[in-house]
Image: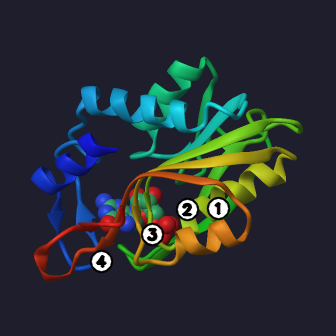
């Protein structure tokens, strides 16, 4: 997606050769026009699939997920990072390893919102080692749902999450695939 790649080159900040900061348009301040374009790209790339629900994880996945849900007219569920005390019903949980924070944390989704027979589109802002995506897949499966696709805004192709998930048979559509960020220069895959 050319608009996204241009924006990454213009406003993305390389923190280390592994971590990209995009908080001026995606992760903190959000550009609604860009999010709208991102959601159009997801709907067009997955136009051959039928989904009845989107699953993401708070907080950065929510904006692209909600706009895509709006376009597809389907609900959006986001996994919560700490099981809230108000979630007294059964919940599906999974653990994510965050290498940016070098720690593990749990995510939870109320069992009310994932049902057997659901066909789920997972959306997230970044794909690095695939821990967040695998946790969302696990939550979908705990509820008897099927993951029909994974939409990623920025895939860091030099980390192995994309390779692992594709080998597991998941269809991943990444709108920008970064090949390397070394030498303070961002290089895209295609
Ligand atoms: P993974 O679980 O695939 O290793 O990492 C994906 C998750 O970690 C995403 O949900 C995202 O929030 C965070 N993440 C991974 N890499 C980056 C990065 O380079 N920049 C930012 N801002 N977040 C990242």
Q: Are marks 3 and 4 in contact (CB under 8 Å)?
A: yes
Q: Position of residue 2 (x, y in %)?
A: 27, 44
Q: Position of residue 177 (x, y in %)?
A: 38, 61
Q: Mark 4 sits on what residue?
A: 18
Q: Mark 3 sits on what residue?
A: 128
CA distance for labels 3 and 2: 9 Å
Q: Classify mark 4 as within 8 Å of ligand 1 or not, answering yes or no.
A: yes
Mark in the foreground, 3 or 2: 3
Residue 26 located left or right of residue 59? left
Q: Classify mark 1 as within 8 Å of ligand 1 or not, answering yes or no.
A: yes
N-terminal-most mark, 3 or 4: 4
Mark 3: few/some/many CA within 10 Å (<14, 14-19, 20+): many
Q: Are marks 1 and 3 in contact (CB under 8 Å)?
A: no
Residue 23 seen in the current view: no
N-terminal-most mark, 1 or 3: 3
Q: Mark 2 sits on what residue?
A: 132
Q: Are marks 1 and 2 in contact (CB under 8 Å)?
A: yes
Residue 182, quarter of picture? bottom left
Quarter of the image with the N terminus is top left
Residue 4 lies, with reference to residue 189, above or below; the image says above
CA distance for labels 1 and 4: 21 Å
Mark 1 residue element:
helix
Mark 4: few/some/many CA within 10 Å (<14, 14-19, 20+): some
Q: Nearer the viewer, residue 31 or 113?
A: 31
Mark 3 residue element:
loop
Residue closest to the far front: 190
Residue 118 lies, with reference to residue 107, above or below; the image says above
Rendered image coloring scheme: rainbow
Mark 1: few/some/many CA within 10 Å (<14, 14-19, 20+): many
Q: Position of residue 165 (x, y in %)?
A: 64, 67
Q: Nearer the viewer, residue 186 or 61?
A: 186
Q: Mark 1 sits on what residue?
A: 135
């Amino acid at each position: 997606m050319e608009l996204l790649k241009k924006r990454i080159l213009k406003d993305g900040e390389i923190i280390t050769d592994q971590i990209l900061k995009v908080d001026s348009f995606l992760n903190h301040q959000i550009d609604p026009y860009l999010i709208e374009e991102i959601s159009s790209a997801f709907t067009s790339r997955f136009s051959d699939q039928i989904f009845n629900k989107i699953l993401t994880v708070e907080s950065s996945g929510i904006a692209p997920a909600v706009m895509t849900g709006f376009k597809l007219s389907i609900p959006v569920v986001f996994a919560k990072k700490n099981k809230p005390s108000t979630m007294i019903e059964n919940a599906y949980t999974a653990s994510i390893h965050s290498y940016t924070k070098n720690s593990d944390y749990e995510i939870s989704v109320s069992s009310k919102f994932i049902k057997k027979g659901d066909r789920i589109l997972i959306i997230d802002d970044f794909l690095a080692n695939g821990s967040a995506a695998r946790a969302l897949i696990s939550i979908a499966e705990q509820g008897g749902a099927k993951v029909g696709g994974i939409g990623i805004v920025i895939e860091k192709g030099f980390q192995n999450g994309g390779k692992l998930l594709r080998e597991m048979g998941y269809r991943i559509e990444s709108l920008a695939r970064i090949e390397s960020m070394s030498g303070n220069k961002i290089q895209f895959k295609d």
